Image (tube, rainbow, N blue to C red):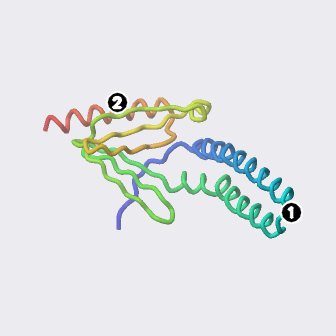
C-alpha cells in the first residue's frame, strides 16, 4: 500500500476556493435568473423552471461547501532529494512522482484571492512540457520550497 505524502497545503485554501466558487455561483445565478425571465416571458411549462433551479442548486451547494473541504483534505505533497510526490483526489486518487532530474523550472504565482490570504501556488514544469501545481502554500513557505527544489534539481543534474 502506498503511503500518502506527509505535507498538506494551508487550510486557508478552503476559503480561497470557496470564494472562487461563490464568484462562479454568482454568474450562474445571474444566468439562471435570465433563464427564469425567459421561462415566464414565453410562458413555458413550470417543470422547466423547477429543473433549471434544481440543477443550479445541485451544482452550487456542493461546489461551494463540500468540494473545497474535500479538495484540501485529500491534497498532500512531499519533497525529497530524488523526487516530488503529489497525491490528490477523493474519488479517484492521483499519485504523481516528479523526478528532480526532469524539472526544468519552478515558479510561484499569486492571484488576488491567494494574496489576500498570504498564500501562493508553486508551479513545477518538467522537461516533457508537463506542469504540476502545489496550491495554497504560505508565501514564505512557497518561496523556500521553490529555492529548495531549485537546489535539489542542480544537485540531481550534477550527478
Above-or-below relation of 110 to 29 = above
Residue at disc 1, secondary structure:
loop
**Residue 43 appears left or right of 152:** right
Closer to us: mark 2 or mark 1? 1
- Whether label 2 touches label 1, CB < 8 Å: no
Residue sticking out furthest to the front: 42
x then y, percent, for residue 139: 49, 31
Q: Position of residue 93 (x, y in %)?
A: 44, 62
Screen quadrant of the C terminus: top left
Q: Which corner quadrant of the image does residue 59 belong to?
A: bottom right
Name the residue at the left extreme: 159
Number of numbered discs visible in the structure rendering: 2
Q: Residue at x 72, y 58 (%)?
A: 56
Q: Is residue 115 left or right of residue 148?
A: right
94, 34: nearer the viewer: 34
Between 112 and 145, the one nearer to me in the picture: 112
Residue position marked by numbered label 2 in the rendering: 147
Foreground residue among 156 and 67: 67
- Which of marks 1 and 2 precedes in the sequence? 1
| Element carrying mark 2 | helix
Image side of residue 138 versus residue 122, left or right: right
Mark carried by residue 43: 1
Where the N terminus falls, by quadrant? bottom left
Q: Nearer the viewer, residue 81 or 109?
A: 109
Location of residue 32 with respect to 12 vertically, above or below: below
Alpha carbons under labels 2 and 1: distance apart: 62 Å
Amino acid at each position: 500500500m502506498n503511503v500518502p505524502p506527509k505535507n498538506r497545503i494551508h487550510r486557508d485554501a478552503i476559503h480561497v476556493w470557496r470564494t472562487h466558487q461563490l464568484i462562479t455561483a454568482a454568474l450562474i445565478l445571474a444566468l439562471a435568473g435570465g433563464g427564469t425571465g425567459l421561462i415566464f416571458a414565453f410562458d413555458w411549462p413550470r417543470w422547466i423552471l423547477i429543473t433549471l433551479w434544481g440543477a443550479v442548486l445541485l451544482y452550487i451547494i456542493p461546489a461551494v461547501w463540500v468540494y473545497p473541504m474535500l479538495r484540501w483534505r485529500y491534497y498532500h505533497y512531499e519533497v525529497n532529494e530524488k523526487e516530488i510526490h503529489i497525491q490528490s483526489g477523493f474519488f479517484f486518487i492521483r499519485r504523481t512522482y516528479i523526478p528532480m532530474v526532469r524539472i526544468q523550472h519552478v515558479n510561484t504565482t499569486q492571484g488576488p484571492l491567494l494574496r489576500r490570504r498570504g498564500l501562493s501556488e508553486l508551479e513545477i514544469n518538467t522537461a516533457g512540457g508537463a506542469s504540476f501545481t502545489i496550491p495554497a502554500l504560505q508565501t514564505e513557505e512557497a518561496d523556500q520550497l521553490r529555492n529548495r527544489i531549485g537546489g535539489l534539481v542542480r544537485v540531481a543534474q550534477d550527478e
